[in-house]
Image (cartoon, rainbow, N blue to C red):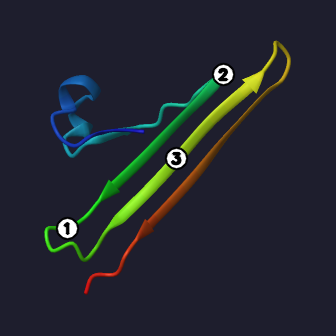
Amino acid sequence: MESLKDGASTTYGADAVAGVVNIKLRHDYHGAEATVEYGNTLDKDSGEYSANLIFGVGDGDTNVSGVMNFYHRNSIA
């Protein structure tokens, strides 16, 4: 997903002054992609972490792809 918050009117016209969201789809995806992220506040009381996995396999006739997401955020004290 691609988000253009402002200045999109030069590309998409006058109706896109507030912003534009583009959704990009993957077609015939082969391989795997993993992402792991961690973040915390300055007071170290609200840690969050996430993990994502995207995979795809197939041949000329059949393709299978999948996405797995995990997200956790601690409560703020």
Q: In the picture shown, does residue 10 fall above or below 16?
A: above
Among the 4 quarters of the image, the one containing residue 26: top right
| Amino acid carrying mark 3 in the image | Asn
State if disc 3 and disc 1 touch (CB < 8 Å).
no
Q: In the picture shown, does residue 26 fall above or below 73?
A: above
Asked if residue 54 lies left or right of residue 16, the reply is right
Q: Earlier in the sequence, mark 1 or mark 2?
A: 2
- Mark 1–mark 3 distance (CA, rounded to whole Å): 22 Å
Residue denoted by label 2: 30
Total marks shown come to 3
Asked if residue 22 lies left or right of residue 42, the reply is right
Residue 2 placement (x, y as % from top left): 36, 36
Residue 13 placement (x, y as % from top left): 25, 29
Q: Residues within 10 Å of mark 3 (few under 14, many from 20)?
A: some
- Mark 2–mark 3 distance (CA, rounded to whole Å): 16 Å
Question: 10 or 4, which lies in front?
Answer: 4
Q: Quadrant of the C terminus?
A: bottom left
Residue 72 placement (x, y as % from top left): 45, 67
Residue denoted by label 3: 52
Residue denoted by label 1: 41
